[in-house]
Image (cartoon, rainbow, N blue to C red):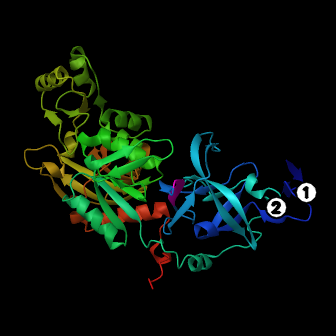
């Protein structure tokens, strides 16, 4: 029952003369979990209190069920990690504010607000997407609390300096992030550079071979594991670098990482859109992004009209699953185009037929987009006798200054697909700049060497920004005695 005392002050199960007035948000401590400060949202509409927890592991201790879990107590940053253990007192189905029900572990801990302290029950849930790492529900306030939702931190606010002091001696505070590079070959230039860039910035970098990762699907304790059974649930971020032939399995892994609350530099959905050339072309068309005229058909009866639809030969034929210039054919005349198209169709291969931009003269522009900005661009020129400008096909890279229109086009193409990190390929035509395709795992070697820019470092910096990690504000663990 709730009683309205004034316009902004509510009583929760109050006994006369025995109450505390708190605001809609307060700093709390959980001494039983060694958490000296955590900001809590006070919500009398919620029955149960909740604590942000990740990497939850079940423990059997003398026949009793316990859990071990990690807490990132400061919102919008993972620079502080506290490893906690607590006895499980219950498992409960809890419906979130978004209407999703999940089974959660319930633990008990002492809680301190200001000079007041009492025991409360807490459910463990991933609250990364929430405004607060802790929710204080009405059961925890019973018989004790008046809530003034118009005010906050009525029992004291903490400046950043105070937070640093409180966590200075925390044993599990980390000076860097745990970042997994999800790829196949650790010796590739791009992968080596990303690993190096992360380590140079003080992060723990872990190379994860896609094919040696596996997952556990479970309502209460889902996991991703690596060879030998090592849990990957404690990672802060994943950088996906996915080979085309491993797309299906890789996307399943990335979905699982996202479900665990682990940040992925490119989401599974964005990668999926970029890998499907037909779908990405449809999205570009729907969003006013100009591309070469493109055709798609199933029946061989439509081949002639398909060729005419893209302004005839010469034309380009692309396999939908191709990348790095593989699966791309130039048909120089109508007869050759018809033969190649029908040959692909007889093999049940899905292809796109695309207008050939002759005036581009075998050149295109690779724009590297990170977090909504073009951070570098190069011109790629096809090798002699070749029409594909891809560096993997022998193309040459050189510096180029791109126009404002080209910058906007590259940024918009990446945004439409939802990619935080992308290589956007643009071709200059008589009609203006056109998007050829967008790569969700763009190579770094050509663009770094041509521009001299630390692209790998920029990628790591973007991850730091997303996770709220700042080097100059890192709290370091105390020196061991």
| The quarter of the displayed image where residue 248 is located | top left
Write down the quadrant of residue 294 in the picture.
top left
Looking at the picture, how far across and down is residue 276, in whole percent?
32, 36
Q: At 70% across and 69% down in the image, what residue appears?
A: 112
Q: Please tell me whether residue 64 belongs to the stretch shown in magenta.
A: yes
**Label 1 crowding class (10 Å Cα cut-off): few <14, some 14-19, many 20+?**
few
Pointer 2 and pointer 1: residues touching (CB < 8 Å)?
Answer: no
Residue 364 on the magenta span: no
N-term mark: 2 or 1: 1
Residue 435 can be seen in this image = no
Q: Which mark is residue 144?
A: 2
The quarter holding residue 359 reads: top left
Above or below 154: residue 222: above
Image quadrant where one finds the C terminus? bottom left
Mark 2 residue element: loop
Magenta part of the chain? 63-69
| Crowd around label 2: few <14 · some 14–19 · many ≥20 (10 Å) | some
* Residue behind mark 1: 6
């Amino acid at each position: 029952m709730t009683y309205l005392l004034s316009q902004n002050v509510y009583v929760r199960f109050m006994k006369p003369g025995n109450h505390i007035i708190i605001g809609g948000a307060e700093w709390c401590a959980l001494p039983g979990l060694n958490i000296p400060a955590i900001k809590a949202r006070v919500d009398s509409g919620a029955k149960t209190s909740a604590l942000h927890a990740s990497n939850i592991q079940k423990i059997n201790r003398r026949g009793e069920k316990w859990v071990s879990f990690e807490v990132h107590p400061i919102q919008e940053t993972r620079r502080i990690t506290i490893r906690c253990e607590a006895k499980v007192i219950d498992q409960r189905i809890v419906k979130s504010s978004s209407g999703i029900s999940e089974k959660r572990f319930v633990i008990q801990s002492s809680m301190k607000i200001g000079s007041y302290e009492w025991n409360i029950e807490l459910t463990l849930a991933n609250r990364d997407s929430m405004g607060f790492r802790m929710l204080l529900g009405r059961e925890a306030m019973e018989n004790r609390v008046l809530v003034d939702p118009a005010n906050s931190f009525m029992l004291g606010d903490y400046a950043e300096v105070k937070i640093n002091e409180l966590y200075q001696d925390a044993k599990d505070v980390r000076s860097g992030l745990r970042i997994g590079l999800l790829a196949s070959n650790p010796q590739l230039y791009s992968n080596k550079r990303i690993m190096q860039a992360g380590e140079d910035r003080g992060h723990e970098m872990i190379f994860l071979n896609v094919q040696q990762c596996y997952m556990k699907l479970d309502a209460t304790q889902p996991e991703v594991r690596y060879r030998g059974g090592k849990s990957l649930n404690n990672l802060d971020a994943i950088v996906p670098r996915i080979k085309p032939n491993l797309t299906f399995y890789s996307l399943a892994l990335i979905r699982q990482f996202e479900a665990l609350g682990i940040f992925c530099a490119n989401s599974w959905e964005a990668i999926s859109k970029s890998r499907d050339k037909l779908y990405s072309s449809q999205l570009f068309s729907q969003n006013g992004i100009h591309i070469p005229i493109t055709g798609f058909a199933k029946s061989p009866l439509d081949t002639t009209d398909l060729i005419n639809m893209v302004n005839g030969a010469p034309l380009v034929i692309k396999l939908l699953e191709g990348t790095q210039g593989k699966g791309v054919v130039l048909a120089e005349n109508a007869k050759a185009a018809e033969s190649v198209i029908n040959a692909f169709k007889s093999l049940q291969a899905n292809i796109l037929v695309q207008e050939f931009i002759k005036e581009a003269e075998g050149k295109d522009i690779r724009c590297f987009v990170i977090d909504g900005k073009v951070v570098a661009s190069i011109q790629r020129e096809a090798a002699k006798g070749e029409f594909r400008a891809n560096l993997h096909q022998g193309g040459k890279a050189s510096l180029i200054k791109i126009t404002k229109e080209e910058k906007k086009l590259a940024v918009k193409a990446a945004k439409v697909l939802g990619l935080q990190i992308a290589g956007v390929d643009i071709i200059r035509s008589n009609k203006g700049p056109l998007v050829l395709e967008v790569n969700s795992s763009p190579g770094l070697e050509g663009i770094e060497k041509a521009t001299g820019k630390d692209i790998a470092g920029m990628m790591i910096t973007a991850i730091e920004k997303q996770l709220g990690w700042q080097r100059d504000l890192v709290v370091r663990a105390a020196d061991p005695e």
